[in-house]
Amino acid sequence: MFKEIVTDVFFDLDHTLWDFEKNSALTFSKILTKNDISVNLDSFLKIYVPTNLKFWKLYREDKITKENLRYERLKTVFDSLSYSITDELIDTLSEEYIEYLSTYNHLFPNAIEILEYLKPNYTLHIITNGFQEVQEKKLKNANIFDYFNVVIDSEFAGVKKPNPIIFDKALKEANVQPERSLMIGDSLEADILGAKAVGFNVLHFNAHGEALHGHCDMIQDLGEIKSYL
């Protein structure tokens, strides 16, 4: 479908190539145990996962700071569980979460296979809203850093997806026109609509079991990219 026009493929990282929820769960298992916090991990994650997505949306919209995001998402979960915890311990957990998160390196099924398939014929890049100090570690620890030519994060760009500036900066760094580019990501708002508004071709990786929509094609497995490129 895109084979005749696309030369450059841009991926989101978290929830698209890098299995954020799996790696995050392993990180929480480690730090909750390490700090003797006696909450059920499944109960914790059941609240944390949607809470984290909610606070990331606020962060994307510049309604909270990075520091607010890291503190409030944890505070909200512990309050919901009626678990008494000090601000100091929340700060410790927040710091340790960032420290250990990138040490886990689970990718989505077929991530390596699709990168191997694409690399000989396309120039590959990353556009991520993740934090600069963490994202490069994730790429390197998961052994996928060398697949990518340009890695743009929101702190480098000064704005977050879906702001058109981050996509324009990525195109400039990659030296490619949007009509020759394909953006693949999990977030309809940040990745798909954001990139489409700048002129990218787009493909939605359905990591969250979302309903079908009319904005672009949706894939359930990264291996399906072969049908398009």
Image (cartoon, rainbow, N blue to C red):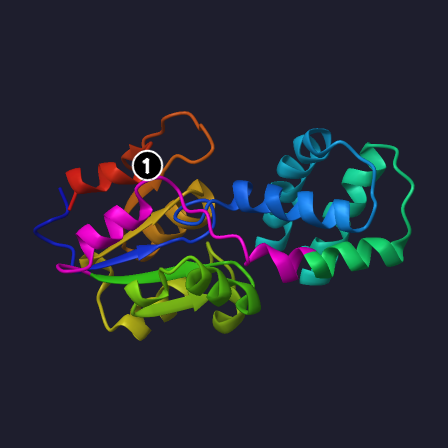
Instruction: Assess whether residue 117 is covered by the magenta stretch.
Output: yes
Q: Which residues are magenta?
A: 97-122
Residue sitting at x 77%, y 39%:
77
Residue 26 x, y percent position in the rendering: 60, 44
| Residue 213, quarter of picture | top left
Residue 31 x, y percent position in the rendering: 72, 50
Total numbered labels placed on residues in the image: 1
Residue sitting at x 88%, y 58%:
88
Is 113 left, or right, of 11 in this rendering? left
Screen quadrant of the N terminus: top left
Q: Residue furthest top?
A: 211
Instruction: Assess whether residue 62 is covered by the magenta stretch.
Output: no
Is 92 left, or right, of 149 in this rendering? right
* Front residue of this view, candidates 37 and 205: 37
Q: What residue would you read off at disc 1?
A: 215
* Front residue of this view, candidates 192 and 100: 100
Q: Amino acid under label 1? A: His
Residue 87 x, y percent position in the rendering: 88, 55
Residue 16 x, y percent position in the rendering: 40, 46
The answer to whether one can see residue 190 in this image is yes
Residues packed near mark 1 inside 10 Å, few (<14), some (14 to 19) or many (20 plus): few
* Front residue of this view, candidates 195 and 31: 31
Is disc 1 placed on a helix, strand or loop?
loop
Residue sitting at x 46%, y 47%:
106
The answer to whether one can see residue 62 in this image is no
